[in-house]
Image (tube, rainbow, N blue to C red):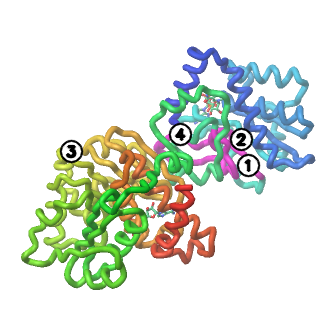
Amino acid sequence: MKSVTAKEMYNIDRKAMEDYHLSGVLLMENAGRAITEKVLKHLSKDSIVVVLVGAGNNGGDGFVIARTLANLGFQVNLIQIAFDQQIKGDAAEHKAIYLKFGYQMTQINQTDIYQDIIQSADVIIDAMLGIGFQGELKEPYRSIVKLINSLNKTVIAVDLPSGVPAETVDGPTLAVQADITYCIEAPKPSAFIERYANFYGEWETVEIGLPKSLLEACKTDVWTLDKVKQTLPKRDKHSHKGSHGRGLVIGGHKEMPGAVRLTATAALRSGVGLLTVGSTSDVLPIVASAVTEATYMDLTDPKLDFESRIQPFDAIAIGMGMGRSDLSRQWLDAVIESDKPIIIDADGLYFLKSHLAKLAERKAPTILTPHPGEMAMLIDQTIQYVKNNPFEVAKDFAKNYQVYLVLKGAYTIVTCPNGEQTINTTGNPGLAKGGSGDCLAGIILAQIMQKGSLKSSLANACYIHGLAADLAIEDHHSTTDLLATDLINFLPDAFRKCLN
Ligand SMILES: NC(=O)C1=CN([C@@H]2O[C@H](COP(=O)(O)OP(=O)(O)OC[C@H]3O[C@@H](n4cnc5c(N)ncnc54)[C@H](O)[C@@H]3O)[C@@H](O)[C@H]2O)[C@@H](O)CC1
Ligand SMILES: Nc1ncnc2c1ncn2[C@@H]1O[C@H](COP(=O)(O)OP(=O)(O)O)[C@@H](O)[C@H]1O
Ligand SMILES: [K+]
């Protein structure tokens, strides 16, 4: 599945018409009928449906939905929230068809009874504004949105909840609070941005007959189980421990010994061939007593030649619970200077700020795993700015510094140095707890050493991390009690689901 910006959607629409001779009227018919199909699940035979129709093509979809529902015998009230002369093009064609069928409509500018009509609804269909929405909501949309949100009705949005932009805009948000949104062909980026996502309620996509090749050409993937199944490497019958990567986890500090333990266990459960934990002498015994399968490196040993000791490894994850001592800064310096693929997390990111310029020169891949707070620190912005503009922030950063960026959150975004992005939809608020990110670093370390592209390895790691948490909740855990250790205990179920 893809996530598609408004600009990309308009381009696809144009090409579908020009190159494939699919008419706009046909696409609108398809969109309306596809959504009607879905709406039927929310109706009983006596349901009163109110369809709110705006001035643009989102409103055009509304005319089709109202006609098909009325044709099926449902009681439908359509309210047109625009002057007649504003309804143009394909939407005007469908309005004419709707009227020709003999179905009724109310015009908001002609009557003040619209409030009563909306209040009489069992189900409200929001076909007011779609991807053409810009700026702030104007009247009469503002009042209608407030009215809808004050009522306890089932609200179904067409493409986007009205008032939600396809991508971030400045200014406050007043938007329809939908129960479910049926996105045309693909969810728009706002479905994954914290300030807008809740307005969508649940969301599903509907297919309207656009050429698949046009959608496939869009750059942002919503990573799905199908994608994981296609790309997650399976172990070869004749493979040996060396085939699955030799990983090094560097971190831990006397006040945070648990972080590397989580990273190491998650890496081992995620397929790493051989694993070494490098930490301080006081942390190592604690980790060693819990992680039997790993080997250990005392990074505080004065005789240690750090540069040569990291040579045998295929990839290194650094920073988890590492603390901010001079010594840990030196470890990070050496790791950045190395020609190894590296994952930098947590305290590693803290030190990274003064090294950013070096990243683009690295010969091997650099993967950064910031949460929005760490991302904000790296770019001298507010956390709110990062959360409101995650796609743009991640793309600019990944391209500028030529890194793979895993911007963590409820929807983690993986960005490649060429700007390609994937969005992860697994996971739940049970992960909003110290230690979840440490597990992710371990899963990533293991996965990037298997076969397959780095992009799919990172996307798969995020998917499996969230899936393990989801499976834990489906089993006997709740989002309140879930611990990072529990998440690791559900990695076997997550892998089995993805590998079968
Ligand atoms: N390929 C596609 O993407 C298809 C899209 N269709 C529908 O077409 C929609 C896009 O159509 P449009 O481009 O006409 O866009 P909209 O339907 O979002 O309408 C834009 C209109 O909304 C008004 N408007 C914009 N900002 C406003 C604000 N702040 N306050 C009040 N009014 C505002 C303007 O008058 C403008 O004419 C999609 O969301 C989808 O529902 C379908 O008809 C079928 C094909
Ligand atoms: N509400 C949520 N829904 C889904 N995933 C979440 C949620 N909150 C956090 N996560 C995930 O949990 C992990 C938290 O990482 P991080 O903030 O680094 O925590 P820590 O370093 O304390 O382990 C990330 O992978 C993030 O995507
Ligand atoms: K809408």
Quarter of the image for the C terminus: give it: bottom right
Q: In the rendered structure, which segment of residues is drawn in magenta?
A: 154-183
Q: Looking at the image, which residue is at 17% across and 74% down?
A: 299
Name the amino acid type tagged 1: Val
Amino acid type, mark 3: Ala
Pointer 4 residue: 2
> Is residue 61 rendered magenta in the image?
no
Q: Which residue is the site of mark 3? A: 360
Is 390 drawn above or below residue 377 in the view shown?
above
Q: Amino acid at mark 2?
A: Asp
- Of badges 2 and 3, nearer the viewer stands 3
Asked if the residue at tag 3 contacts the one at tag 4, i.e. Cβ–Cβ closer than 8 Å, the answer is no
Horizontal side of residue 229 vs 476, given as left or right = left
Q: Which mark is residue 155?
A: 1
> Crowding near pointer 2: few (<14 within 10 Å), some, many (20+)?
many
Assign a secondary structure to mark 2: strand
391 up-or-down from 30: above or below: below
Marks 1/2 in contact by CB < 8 Å: the verdict is yes
Across and down, in percent, residue 290 comes to 36, 82
Is 102 on the left or on the right of 427, as rendered?
right
**Residue of label 2:** 126
Mark 4 vs mark 1, CA separation in Å: 25 Å
Main SS, magenta region, reads loop
